[in-house]
Image (cartoon, coloured by chain):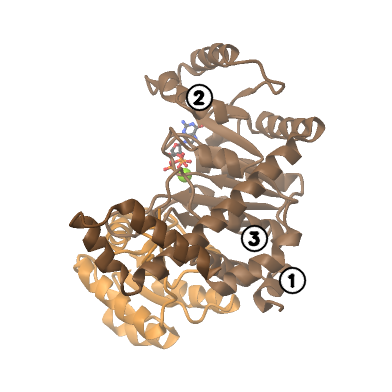
Amino acid sequence: MREVSATGPKGRVLIAKPGLDGHDRGAKVIARALRDAGYEVIYTGIRQTPEMIAEAALQEDVDAIGLSILSGAHMTLFPRIMDALHQRGLEDVVVWAGGIIPDEDIPRLRVLGLQAVFRPGSPTGETIAFLEQALGRRGVRAG
Amino acid sequence: MSSAIAEAVRGGDRRALARLMSLVEQGTAEGRAALRQLFPHTGRAHVVGVTGPPGSGKSTLVKALALAYRAQGKTVGIVAVDPTSPFSGGALLGDRIRMQELHADPGVFVRSMATRGSMGGLARSTIEVVHLLDAFGKEVVFVETVGVGQDEVDIARAADTTLVVGVPGLGDDVQALKAGVLEIADVFVINKADRENANQLAAELTMLLSLSEPRAWQVPIVQTVATEGRGIDQLVEAIARHRAYLEQSGHWRVRRADQARRQVVAIVEDRLKEQLERLLAQEGWVSRFDQVAERTQDPYAVAEAVVARLLARG
Ligand SMILES: Nc1nc2c(ncn2[C@@H]2O[C@H](COP(=O)(O)OP(=O)(O)OP(=O)(O)O)[C@@H](O)[C@H]2O)c(=O)[nH]1
Ligand SMILES: [Mg+2]
């Protein structure tokens, strides 16, 4: 009965899609890739508000959050997401983003706590490698 | 010994509740200690299981039911179980997609769980996570099983009221339902009643149910359109009637006693397995397995020796 749980998943990850655009192909691709890499992936669907994302992260006790951003509203959405996370005491959750973010915006987002950005079409292996490292540094709670 | 995290959960700390769920899921000693401390505060919630084939609308129904109970002022917990991939150990947990309307309400707490190798539609620690929501003060706790469609008997043993969800137009609907699933239904839900053939399915089900041996509780058949909230009031009413029936007939206590026995047995089995694995990891046993493989010893003799050692450890 415990074949799988003997080692447990590598961690719990929330894949969230803030903003108003309705395309979630990229988010679904990364969600599946992470499942196949051994993570438990909570996928919440499109059009997530910062509050929805933070609340899901809290209830699901995730180790990391991947934000799929295409809408170009990252400079307003991202600070609000980080705020909502901090309000709930979730400052130790690893946060990364996938999508189109202009280079000049990245330093400011990094200061706010964004740990990595992956362009659309970048190999999923890069995200997986990043996550493995980031959660290793953080000392992920096994299982 | 007092557990700080258990205190925090009793004090209404949602983050502590989420954290403790993980500790319990991982089977840690800290989680177990907290569970023990919280146990006296459990047993109050009405646990409602929701099972049925993949895509039948279980999550959408749970959301609609949660909204209805919230409108009555009752607090709600939800545990949604999805399968772990046997290949990677990972899982895709997508039930929250249908529950977005609930996120802003602090009276609702939703937790997704992966089966982590368990069969039967639940995860190994689903019952403990239900207990945590119960101790947290949730008055109604829904458990959505994996959508496997056939042998989700486990939910019937964990829930006070089990809803079996079917949908019209699957072609083989009634046949698919016969195998074991009908027997566990306390309430039968025909969801997606906006589709054709809902009445036909209802008629076939009524016929099937009438063939089973008569029971004191007549399983009601409720038609719903979960996406529009249609039929939800009738479903809430059927669930309330089932609870009243359980209490009046004494079955509430019978079910709870049966659940308690199963839980104790499951804990004992887990502990014995742990001890067995620890024992067999010690030197000496490997060579005895080799002897069995070479037929210089028989497996029964070695098993007897293992049992003797296990019991001697006390
Ligand atoms: N037409 C119609 N569609 C519905 C109804 N209820 C749910 N759906 C749709 O059916 C699909 C599946 O619904 P879910 O609630 O995710 O079903 P589920 O049983 O939880 O699915 P799994 O958890 O994957 O097994 C979604 O697209 C829903 O919008 C209904 O009453 N009528
Ligand atoms: Mg579902």
How far apart in space, not on screen, are marks 1 and 3 (Cα)? 13 Å
How far apart in space, not on screen, are marks 3 and 2 (Cα)? 37 Å
Name the quadrant of the C terminus of chain A. bottom left
The residue that mark 2 highlights is B194
Quick one: label 2, few (<14), some, or many (20+) residues within 10 Å?
some
Q: Does the residue at mark 2 contact the one at mark 1 (Cβ under 8 Å)?
A: no
The residue that mark 1 highlights is B11
Q: Quadrant of residue B55?
A: top left
Sequence-wise, which precedes: disc 2 or disc 1?
Answer: 1
In the rendered view, would you say B255 is above or below B83?
A: above
In the rendered structure, find residue B132 and report the number of the disc placed on it. Answer: 3
Say whether residue B44 is visible.
yes
The residue that appears at 22% across and 62% down in the rendered structure is: B290
The residue that appears at 38% across and 64% down in the rendered structure is: A6
Q: Position of residue A2 (x, y in %)?
A: 40, 57
Q: Position of residue B116 (x, y in %)?
A: 41, 56
Chain B rendered in what hue?
brown
In the image shown, does B29 or B131 lie closer to the viewer? Answer: B29
